[in-house]
Image (cartoon, rainbow, N blue to C red):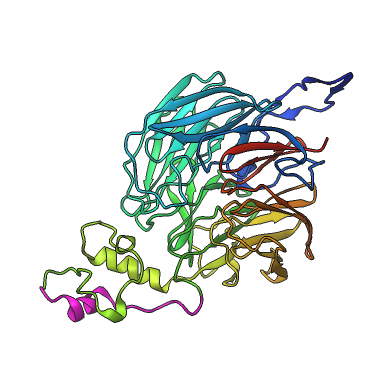
Amino acid sequence: MRKCYAARLVVFGLVTWVAEEPVCWADWPGFRGPNASGVAETTGLPVEFGPKINVVWQTALPAGASSPVVTASRIFVTGAGERKLETICLDRLTGKILWRQAIAPMRSEALHQLNNPASPTPVTDGENVYAFFGDFGLVSYGPAGKERWRLPLGPFSNLHGMAASPILDGNQLYLVCDQDSDSYLLAIQKDSGKVLWKTARPEAVHGFATPSIFQPSQGPAQVIVPGSYQLTAYSVETGKPLWWVRGLTWQVKPTAVVNDDTIYVTGWAPGADAGERQNLPAFEEALKEGDRDRDGKLSPQEVPERLRHRGSWNAIDLGRDGFLDARDWNFYRARRSAQNVTMAIRPGHATGDLTETHVLWQIDRSVPVVSSPLLYLGVLYTIKDGGIFSALDPASGRIHRQARLPGAIDNYYASPVAADSKIFVVSETGKVSVVKAGKDWELLSLNNLNEPCYATPALAGSHIYLRTQTTLYCFGRP
């Protein structure tokens, strides 16, 4: 339950304005807002904006790809500087930095060129903030910036570095740490930092999807985690796996969207599009063909030419020992046969493997690479690299309209967000398409931020909070 606070008195020149209704304490509490939905209940958002258009304020920030989170009076973001991992608090009204706290990294883990030590988005309960850094672990700060607790985690064996964000439900934090060895899901008591339970995810290798919460019509809530080859639901009370659906690709980045009784999930990974998949032989057969020294493993030179991985060896050598053992090969084999897909699941109150019984639909066309899906006003939206924007029927998966966003044929790492009958879609180079929501969506405007953008915007109080590579902007109508 989110708290509310009494309206503040705000003076603009000689005009005094008082809100007649209470404002929710955490308007945009974590990655993609309330339960990662990407949807805000606000109006009056600008259609045109940019570095010199409809800027309420702007504040320079250190490097980071985390998204801003918004409370009644504060904004939290993270950043990474020289040998420091920062959590930054800004005044929501002015953009002034109120405090910034830093911790020293415990290590410097390998990162994809587009990843960053401050990629995970923090989460707030309206007063306190909780931040995760792959080079350290979890840390929590109070309203004035005083450290409340820290929980060192790792080191992690993630080929591209960690990127999933913590989420908060009630008094518990949840963090998924999917990596090439020893993946797990954590539940942490938010006020003490105590680990309540830790559940192993042996089927999962490196992934980057932030969890979300599913509340069935009966029974306790569930933590929904998309990962390698399947989506899994866990009990919030015990961490026990309750049900799962197979059929996802091998490396999942988008967050699942929950709407009442239905869950929408999508996943794309290299080599898993239709026409790219390959059926590899079992490990025993591969050994017979290539294991020349008969040590029960395969070196890069021993893998038969027709079966060789065309990318990085470390991407399939999960143990990082220079050889493929049975686990490595089985992952590689499953990876080559995996499919990129978008699907809808209605789990009801069932348990166990629901793959054959509870999948409403699935499609393998125009699957987003990184961006999460958006369900808004009865339509499901996705954005794929190349600016391919799709509107789908959430009940059947049928495509209502699919077209490229004019002037924004680009890569997309930020996820679409929506409010005020508008959808905001941010490209890698800082092109922001504002789309009129609907089955037959139409482009309202194209705005240029003139620098790269990887963070998902936050929408709250008739304002857009948008982070570029160097700056946090607050956009609003005059």
Give above or below for 309 relative to 63: below
Q: Would residue 433 be found to the left or right of residue 135 on screen?
A: right
Residue sitting farthest toward the right: 14
Give above or below for 237 relative to 325: above
Choose between 425 and 232: the one closer to the eye: 425
**Is residue 20 in view?**
yes
Residue 82 position in % (x across, y down): 40, 33
Choose between 25 and 43: the one closer to the eye: 43
* Quadrant, the N terminus: top right
Q: Main secondary structure of the magenta part?
A: loop
Q: In the rendered structure, does residue 280 fall within the stretch colored magenta?
A: yes
What residue sits 46% from the left and 61% below the top?
230
Residue 284 position in % (x across, y down): 22, 76
What residue sits 50% from the left and 55% below the top?
253
Q: Would residue 392 be found to the left or right of residue 308 on screen?
A: right
Give above or below for 133 relative to 48: above
Q: Write down the region rendered in magenta.
A: 274-293
Residue 404 position in % (x across, y down): 69, 67
